[in-house]
Amino acid sequence: MLADTSDIGQEAALLVQVMIGRVNKAQTSDSLLELERLADTANARIVGSITQHRSRPTPGFFIGEGKLADIKLACSRTGANLIIFDNDLSAIQVNNLDLALNMKVIDRTELILQIFARRARSAEAQIQVELAQLEYLVSRIPISRKQQRFQGGIGMKGPGESPFQLRNDPMRRRIRDLKKKLSNIQARRRTTRKRRALPMVSLVGYTNAGKSTLMNVLARTNAYVDDRLFATLDTKTRLVHISGAGNVLLTDTVGFIRDLPHGLVASFHSTLEEVAESDFLLVVVDASHPHVLEHIAIVEDALKEMGAAHVPSVLLLNKTDCPPAEVAMPALLTAFPNAIPVSARERKGITEIKKAICDRVLWRGSAAFAGVAPE
Ligand SMILES: Nc1nc2c(ncn2[C@@H]2O[C@H](COP(=O)(O)OP(=O)(O)OP(=O)(O)O)[C@@H](O)[C@H]2O)c(=O)[nH]1
Ligand SMILES: [Mg+2]
């Protein structure tokens, strides 16, 4: 695990949001709300927020000089000792902002990486997070033109390797080692999966949709549930008996979020591999969320990205016990007529979920019996 020297827990954070181009008020406040939830999940105390609209970011600071002065003022007024940008910043911008404001500045990707670092429990999740952190660091090493001119010079290892890259060789070596460890764990997991040969069902969806709560209801387990983002970072698989279908393997997975850092997506491929190999997906969404449609689209995109778009699935409209979900339900059911309304909290819709699993498992069995390859 990387030394967590930059842990942001308990710091007083000022949130900075720069909206680029034409963006409406609702998008601005939603994006800020999600950043607040992420900061809260990382245990930071939010002391204020600043929003700026620009047609494009500035290369040096992302924001304009006037805003830089506003931020300085806000920091001294609120006692902030950490600044979190909602936008992705370049290494140069972070460095310039750090120096100009004399304060730690991080962006949304780094915030998510820190949450993942805090939450990862299993050896596998820890390796995945360290890998993502290292890849993020390596991707941010600026290779200036001046350094590139040294390429292939006397005493250099050869073309294509700048002094910077050479200095970061230990990092790259560590990345290689971690990838090897991860693929060993994955290989072991694949063998166990094959040996069991049971139908695999996975719970997937946007973070905080209620996947782990449903896992607890369906598998009568005690998975960690929290009203914070990314509560689950360790995939958990349980044997569940579905009457009429027999035993199935039910897996709870890491939640998705918009603009998930690419390094993280890649690092969590091993858990996602399980999703792509599943026989059936339970796609969970929070039907009470004002952006449930956007969440469904993000989940669909993520499933495509991980090669799981072909896996048969059912949409579970969770949290129907919340009043906003009741209001949204007719429109959602018109748009998604096969979806199942569910309240994991009140254990509603559970029989329907089990029936959907059962139908799928029986279909899979009969297709295999008739010599048809299951989809
Ligand atoms: N009102 C209501 N709240 C629910 C329901 N299901 C889950 N929750 C709450 O929603 C929050 C998130 O639940 P989790 O089960 O941790 O969600 P998750 O999808 O596993 O979240 P991550 O692991 O962070 O991706 C918790 O506070 C749950 O108590 C439901 O049916 N109704
Ligand atoms: Mg969870």
Image: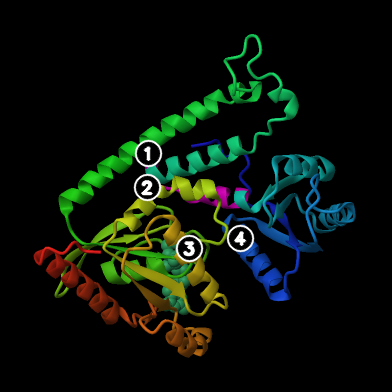
State whether residue 207 appears in this view. no
Q: Which residue is mark 2?
A: 270
Question: Which residue is at 78% across, 56% downward?
Answer: 56
Q: Amino acid at mark 1?
A: Leu
Q: Give the mark toward the camera: 4 or 3.
A: 3
Mark-to-mark CA distance, 4 and 1: 30 Å
- Confirm whether the magenta stretch covers residue 215: no
Mark 2 neighbour class, 10 Å CA radius: few under 14, some 14 to 19, many 20 or more: many
Q: Which quadrant is the C terminus positioned in?
A: bottom left
In 3D space, how far apart are the residues under numbered discs 1 and 2 (Cα atoms)?
8 Å
Q: Residue furthest top?
A: 154
Foreground mark, 1 or 3, reads 3
For the residues labelled 1 and 2, say whether their Cβ atoms are less than 8 Å apart: yes
**Comes first in the chain, label 1 or label 2:** 1
Q: Which quadrant of the view contains residue 318?
A: bottom left
**Secondary structure state at the residue bearing disc 1:** helix
The correct choice, above or below, for 125 with respect to 299 in the image is above
Please indicate whether residue 73 sits to the left or right of residue 14 in the image. Answer: right
Disc 3 element: helix
Q: Identity of the amino acid at label 4?
A: Asp
For marks 4 and 2, give the one nearer the viewer: 2
Q: Amino acid at mark 3?
A: Asp
Dot 1, how many residues are within 10 Å of its Cα: few (below 14), some (14-19), or many (20+)?
A: many
Residue 261 in the image: x percent, y percent?
Answer: 56, 51
Mark 3 and mark 2 lie on one chain; the one further toward the N terminus is 2
Element type at mark 2 = helix
